[in-house]
Image (cartoon, rainbow, N blue to C red):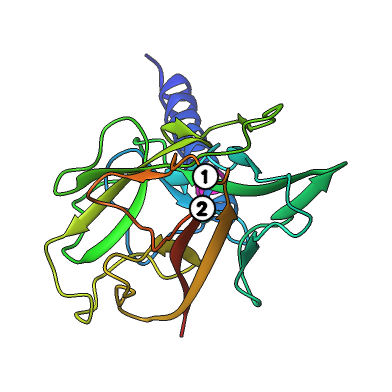
Amino acid sequence: MDKYSQNFEKNFNKISARLDEANLTAESIMANFLFPKEEQVWPAGTYGLLRPDTGCPEDLAFYEGDTGYFKFHTESSSLLPDNGHSKNTHLSRPIVSSYSVNTFITLRFCITNGVYNSGAWPDGRYCIHQKHSCPDGFNTGSVTVNTESWGNLDAYGGNTPSGSPSQMYFCCRINGNPTTPMVLPTRHPFYLYQYDGRCQQVKGMKVTEEYIQLDTEPGSGGNSYHPYLPANSAGDIVRLELCYYTKY
């Protein structure tokens, strides 16, 4: 190879290397713009969190995981169904809706893909929605919701947790002290469920207690609770106790 050819090849390789570096930089900038890095990675597994009004965490762990919802057809024979939620709830809206004489509660979800999240969930006392099998260290629980029996219009779609509006499944961790702060990503607001009527503390996050309440079909005793459950309910009312986290 003559000197001219050697110089040409050398310069070509330099240019190619710079172009590759520029492409990587551009891809990194775009990735950081679309999915800003969290201070902490979301723990491993497939699972669901309730979707707040700010949307799902902007993290690859929840990529394409913001489409799911459960729409509960609640008791509709009463003129004043006892559906409700915290006055200053941060759940994604609309929550309570009606159609003709029918009343509904809609919950929306953030579902992990199980690809871009890693590491173990920290010890504590809290619950999340089950998606397939529970992550290591969790116990499975469920809540059966006896939704409207006459012309039932329950609905669900998108990327949802396991179950349906009439049968929800949860993963509950009960091996720690809720007053001992655990470490989770803090960049974006999120929800967990209470266990034992207390919110788990999270390092760097302020927690607010909230609730969602469903008025179910009366008289049949159809609501039921597996031992591990995020509920505080009586009679025909299913009340789910929530914990809403925002960064200090």
Left or right of residue 47: residue 70:
right
Along the line of sight, which residue is nearer the eye, 77 or 240?
A: 77
Look at 26% across and 46% down and name the residue there. Answer: 118
How busy is the neighbourhood of tag 1: few (under 14 within 10 Å), some, or many (20 plus)?
Answer: few
Q: Is residue 149 above or below residue 117?
A: above
Percent x, y of residue 185: 37, 65
Along the line of sight, which residue is nearer the eye, 58 or 227?
A: 227
Left or right of residue 225: residue 234:
right
Name the amino acid, label 1.
Gly
Name the amino acid, label 2.
Asp
Q: Is residue 120 above or below residue 123?
A: above
27 magenta-colored:
yes
Which SS does the magenta portion mostly show? helix
As drawn, the residue found furthest toward the right would be: 100
Look at 52% across and 54% down and name the residue there. Answer: 32
Per the rendered image, the range of residues in magenta is 24-28
Q: Disc 1 marks which residue? A: 219
Percent x, y of residue 232: 39, 63
Percent x, y of residue 247: 47, 79
Q: Disc 2 marks which residue? A: 236
Look at 60% across and 40% down and name the residue there. Answer: 69
Percent x, y of residue 132: 33, 30
3 magenta-colored:
no
